[in-house]
Structure formats: C-alpha cells, structure tokens
Amino acid sequence: MDLFDEPETMRYDIPTIAKSKTDFELINGWTIDKNSARYLNRGTIK
C-alpha cells in the first residue's frame, strides 16, 4: 500500500516544496508557463 510514494519508484524529481499551506516553491529545474499559471487561484509559487 505504501509502495508508490517511495523515492525509488518516482520517475521524475519532485517539482515543488511547500513553504506553508499556500506558499510553494518550484525546485529541481521545474517551471510553469504563464498560460498554465492562470489556473492557479490560491497561494503563491516562487
């Protein structure tokens, strides 16, 4: 049951870290384009 969230089974690097409940930071070279960002309506992404 706890197999799929193990680091060994994840294909890509983790894209974000949570600074708080509504504040996130993109890491590991991940980006988000302006078109996709318009769908975010709560919190912030750095």
Image (cartoon, rainbow, N blue to C red):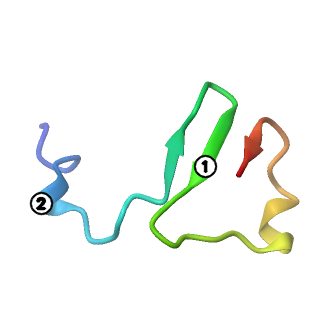
How many marks on residues? Answer: 2
Instruction: Give me the disc on residue 35.
Output: none
Indicate the position of residue 12 as horizontal and vertical percent values. Answer: 33, 70
Is residue 18 left or right of 9 when viewed as pictured?
right
Q: Quadrant of residue 31?
A: bottom right
Indicate the position of residue 36 as horizontal and vertical percent values. Answer: 78, 68
Q: Secondary structure at mark 1?
A: strand
Asked if 35 appears above or below 15 in the picture, the reply is below
- Local crowd size for mark 2, using a 10 Å CA cut-off: few (<14), some (14–19), many (≥20): few
Q: In the image, what residue occupies the spot 60% across and 49% down?
A: 25
Q: CA distance from mark 1 to mark 2?
A: 23 Å
Q: In the image, what residue occupies the spot 88% across and 60% down?
A: 38
Q: In the image, what residue occupies the spot 71% across and 49% down?
A: 45
Q: In the image, what residue occupies the spot 18% across and 54% down?
A: 7
Q: Nearer the viewer, mark 1 or mark 2?
A: 1
Cβ–Cβ under 8 Å for marks 1 and 2: no
Q: Quadrant of residue 34?
A: bottom right
Indicate the position of residue 42 as horizontal and vertical percent values. Answer: 80, 36
Q: Secondary structure at mark 2?
A: helix
Asked if 13 appears above or below 4 in the picture, the reply is below
**Rendered-image quadrant of the N terminus:** top left
Q: Pointer 2: what residue? A: 8
At label 2, the amino acid type is Glu
- Which callout, 1 or 2, points at the residue further toward the start of the chain? 2
At label 1, the amino acid type is Glu
- Local crowd size for mark 1, using a 10 Å CA cut-off: few (<14), some (14–19), many (≥20): some
Q: Pointer 1: what residue? A: 25
Is residue 7 left or right of 33 when viewed as pictured?
left
